[in-house]
Amino acid sequence: MVTPAAMTPLSAGLRKIAGMEPAEWRERGRQLLLKSGERFFGMRQGEMNDRTFRRRLVSPFDQASVETVAEDVLEVMRGLDFSRRPFMPLFGARELTASLLRRRFPAECERLLHRADRAIAGRFDLLGLTDVSFGHPIDWHLEPLSGKRTGNPHWSAISYLNPAVAGDKKITWELNRHGHFVTLGQAYLLTKDDRYAEAFINQLTAWLDANPPRRGINWASSLELSIRCIAWLWAMPCFAWSGRLTPPIIWRILKSLVQQGSYIESYLSHYFAPNTHLTGEALGLLYLGTALPWLSDASRWRGLGLRILLEQLPRQVQPDGVYFEHASYYHRYTTDFYVHAMLLARAGGLALPPEVSETLARLLDHLLWITRPDGKSTLYGDDDGGRLLILQQRESSDFRDTLQIGAALCGIGTWKWAAGPACPEVLWLLGPEGLQAYDRLAPVEPDSVIKRFPTSGFVVLRDGWNQRSSYVFVDAGAHGAMNYVHAHADALSFEYASNGVTWMVDPGTYTYTKDPELRDQFRSSSAHNTLVVEGQSQSQSNGPFSWAQVAESTLQEVTATAEAATCRGVHNGYERFNPPVRHQRSIQLIKRSDRPASSYLLIEDRIITVGSYRYQLRFHLASDCKPTHGNGRCVVHHPNGPQLAVGIWLVNPQRAGTAIPIGVEEGWVSPEYARKLPAPILVANAEGAGEQIFVTVLAPLDGEAAVDLECLARLATDRDVQYAA
């Protein structure tokens, strides 16, 4: 067996340079010159002085006193003058919003106040971590798990991808996105308690002191600055009635927002990361340009941000509505970005072309289909754990707030069917009128149970739309886009839920840079519900954000009858072997003839080769599932009562219909970035020469008598299963 040599980093870099267009040369050169000027000559470093800042204000504010500018800012943020209301609806209806929140969502309000109190004490829930401390006072450059501290050199001098230097930089960055500033603002709106205003001002002032412009890790990513600016722009109006938000504080915040906006504009990720980095940065500029009309940069930033968002929409969203990097968490990010862009355009009186709402509807429809019966979403590809705006703490895989907001904006009842009763985010983001619109919307059950996303190659099979329905998500699509930054080696993998239980899951991401071995492990084929040949991944990694070789998948067939829904695909990831191996998988969701209201899953894996190889089928169970063995089959138990019977057979001319023993390994599931839980893996091993066919049956039991292997075998053969290519 031979495999092609991986491209060396040097050869890959030279090839990339040779392929650059003139526009990329110019932009990269401009950014390099600017970065060098900052780093070696001190350009643009240090907090902006008052004289320079005044030149960034529009007339007559460029000549006004600090108090006059601050008073006008407060007047707009208080929302008293309808013609000058701030950029989001709730700020014009604070008292009604707070009253509705306390009445409709009392438990969520209590949890929010608890988080705000802990933020005052310097303790935070970040990503998959709970009750994390960054020191007291807060050390804004600390990564607390590793103890690494990056200090305050110029941002370009920090090797933030190196865990020996920065630990897991995402943990540091997540705190410095300042999502908890919004939480403090929400707490103040609910209580009028100035403790929250004091904490906001004290922490923000401390951050400004510790993070001078263009120095330190918190100035190393334009996207991080963008999300931080959005958090500040949401937090400030929350405190507009507090006497703690004094003119000098407002003046200093505005100066920092100008400097952060200038940095974002200077270092837009047109070529570094033209994905959610670029669209998130564009949204930050649109926010700054919409919320801060006192700035002379506002109009330019607003126009630039909107132009980039419009340009990137057809590039980053495929015709079937799926985000082009094939990572559901980043799909959710993208959906949120364009929801906020639509709201900002409305607030600023900007006309959007109809393609925006049409594409946004396709993005939201994909979220509908990947919402499992338990309300969580399938996490295929990378999950970075972050949020654009944290208005309520929720699990990383729960996207229903985005779906609800989309339903309220677009009036789509099928989205509400899956999204459920209104959540607090609808009120926080859309205000009382938005909540009323969602309440009025009638939920409508989708009229289809099978969905093919033809461009991406994803398929969803269901047998209904209630909490006990069966759900299957199948990945038979391309590895992703660009350099496959957020892809996993998950060709022909699937997720499966039935009887109110999610049984088989994608184990998630866990980390990007903290542990290279775990990074590779979580995105390997062995970490997905697919077939592995010779213990190797279908796609081979080449660093935390790149791949040396990728598998190409093809979705061959999707059909549905009254009895079954079927999809079939193939990938070439093991054709690099000598002799080559081709893996074809068929997945059928079949209604049981003896129990018409119940469905089971039949999976056929066909191996096409002339060689002799070792094969392993791997099925990753959710962390709350427990497998046991008996009567020649495996039964998976869930604490709530349902059970799942599993049987696997090898079908070939030499060993026709031979049952394969199912073993159990201990593995990991990462439900959120930076958190992992032990979870069992069902494993079936086999080896052989030439063509192989494996048949797997997953049959829900739901408290009925135990099913033996012969019963499972009958389920596997009671249909005319075709083994043709």
Image (cartoon, helix red, strand yellow):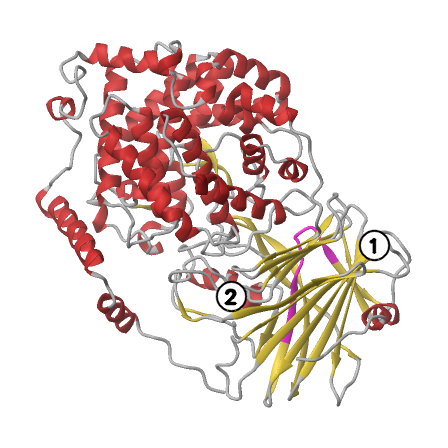
Q: Can residue 187 be spotted in the picture? A: yes
Residue 591 place in picture, x, y as percent: 82, 59
Residue that carries the numbered disc 2 in the rendered image = 489
Among the 4 quarters of the image, the one containing residue 399: top right
Q: Nearer the viewer, residue 196 or 487?
A: 487
Which span of residues is magenta-colored? 616-626
In the rendered view, tell whether residue 381 sits above or below residue 617: above
Report x, y in % for residue 692: 68, 82
Crowding around mark 2 (Cα neighbors within 10 Å: few <14, some 14 to 19, many 20+) is many
Going by the numbered disc 2, the residue's amino acid type is Ala
Image point 58% across, 23% down: which residue?
435
How packed mark 1 is, by other alpha carbons closer than 10 Å (few <14, some 14-19, many 20 or more), is many
Specify whether residue 660 is painted magenta. no
Q: Position of residue 513 (x, y in %)?
A: 40, 55
Determine the residue positioned at 48% across, 81% down. Answer: 576
Q: Residue 123 location in percent, x, y?
A: 45, 32
Which numbered mark, 1 or 2, is in the foreground of this view? 1
Of mark 1 and mark 2, the one earlier in the sequence is: 2
Whether residue 48 sits left or right of residue 695 in the image: it is: left
Q: How many angstroms separate mark 1 from mark 2 (CA)? A: 32 Å
- Quadrant location of the C terminus? bottom right
- Secondary structure under tag 2 reads loop
Which residue bears the numbered disc 1?
A: 598
